[in-house]
Image (cartoon, grey):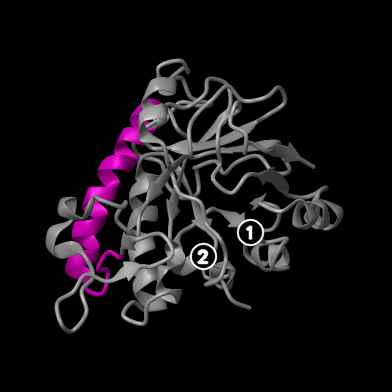
């Protein structure tokens, strides 16, 4: 089972994002506290209609109960809102914001995820993990203040795409993010990386967001650790249909276009089981 070959979208279209954000409400699904623990945070409702809006926010269709949006956007009043952050890699063109926290090879060159032209963050030492977490946690705090209910830290699986980062590094780093999110009353999701679903005591994660688990027959791997607290995103109709047939009565499953565009785009696709 491999997670290195999947196609993964990114939050894109920042100009569109800012323009549309003004049209949506900032109220959240529930009030956000500041002293909650992992035992008191609330994961997304299971088997609920989900919309993946990390590309650009838009008014969700009738019946949608859960939505994921980029941390620069606002949540949707009355829904369960998940806040997307790129936690293990720098956004393209944002390298200067991270300085010596970028991963470098033995020659001092920045190491990139070639699929997305994103620099890896250097989570190899406890000191740098904490420094990076401090920056990510500023976004988490903003998500909590806006009224989001959960955090979606992307690229947990970055250790599968460079030998310089270990699985242990990733677990230790995401545990820092989990502890902080829980302190803000936010649940936190495991993004991809099915082999870590049963390592929750080490990661502190509360639910899973799985891209293409139907495509790669991995949905069951996520349920081993999270039971039905799994959101599945498919980008191919055949994989979506297969996932719905096997898991549609248990999990939240949505078909989206791979660049997660908004309605009005010629590429836009959204369908739920």
- Residue placed under numbered mark 1 in the picture: 226
Magenta residues? 120-146
Residue 115 sits inside the magenta stretch: no
Residue at position x 22%, y 73% from top?
A: 125
Quarter of the picture holding the N terminus:
bottom right
Q: Is residue 159 left or right of residue 46?
A: left
Query: Where on the picture, by quarter, is residue 265?
Result: top right
Residue 230 vertical position relative to residue 121 in the rendered view, above or below: above
Residue lying at the far front in this picture: please name it: 266
Query: Where on the picture, by quarter, is residue 36?
Result: top left
Front residue (pair 160, 237): 237
Whole-percent x, y for residue 154 in the image: 44, 55
Judged by its main secondary structure, the magenta piece is helix
The 10 Å Cα crowd at callout 1, few under 14, some 14 to 19, many 20 or more, is some
Q: Are marks 1 and 2 in contact (CB under 8 Å)?
A: yes
Q: Is residue 147 left or right of residue 257?
A: left
* Label disc, if present, on residue 200 of the rendered structure: 2
Residue at position x 61%, y 34% from top?
A: 66
Residue 125 sits inside the magenta stretch: yes
Residue 159 vertical position relative to residue 186 in the rendered view, above or below: below
Whole-percent x, y for residue 149 in the image: 48, 36
* Label disc, if present, on residue 212 of the rendered structure: none
Residue at position x 69%, y 44% from top?
A: 254
Query: Where on the picture, by quarter, is residue 198?
Result: bottom right
Which secondary structure lies at badge 1? helix
Give whichever of discs 1 and 2 has the lower sequence position. 2
Residue at position x 60%, y 57% from top?
A: 210
Whole-percent x, y for residue 106 in the image: 18, 84
Q: Is residue 169 left or right of residue 188?
A: left
The 10 Å Cα crowd at callout 2, few under 14, some 14 to 19, many 20 or more, is some
CA gap, disc 1 and disc 2: 9 Å
């Amino acid at each position: 089972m491999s997670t290195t070959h999947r196609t993964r979208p990114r939050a894109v279209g920042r100009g569109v994002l800012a323009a549309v954000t003004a049209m949506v409400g900032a109220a959240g699904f529930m009030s956000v506290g500041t002293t909650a623990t992992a035992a008191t945070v609330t994961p997304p409702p299971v088997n609920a209609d989900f919309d993946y809006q990390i590309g650009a926010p838009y008014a969700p269709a009738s019946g949608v109960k859960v939505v994921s949006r980029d941390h620069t956007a606002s949540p949707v009043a009355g829904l369960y809102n998940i806040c997307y952050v790129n936690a293990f890699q720098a956004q393209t063109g944002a390298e200067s914001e991270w300085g010596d926290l970028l991963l470098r090879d033995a020659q001092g060159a920045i190491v990139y995820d070639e699929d997305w032209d994103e620099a890896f963050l250097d989570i190899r030492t406890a000191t740098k993990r904490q420094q990076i977490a401090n920056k990510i946690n500023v976004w988490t705090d903003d998500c909590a203040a806006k009224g989001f209910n959960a955090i979606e830290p992307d690229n947990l699986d970055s250790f599968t795409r460079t030998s310089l980062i270990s699985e242990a590094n990733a677990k230790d780093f995401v545990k820092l993010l989990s502890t902080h999110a829980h302190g803000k009353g936010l649940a936190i999701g495991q993004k991809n990386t099915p082999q870590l679903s049963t390592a929750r005591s080490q990661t502190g994660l509360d639910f899973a967001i799985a891209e293409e688990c139907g495509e790669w027959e991995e949905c069951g791997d996520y349920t081993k650790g999270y039971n039905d607290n799994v959101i599945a995103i498919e980008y191919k109709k055949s994989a979506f249909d297969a996932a719905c047939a096997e898991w549609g009565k248990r999990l939240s499953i949505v078909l989206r276009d791979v660049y997660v565009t908004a309605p009005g785009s010629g590429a836009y696709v959204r369908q739920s089981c």
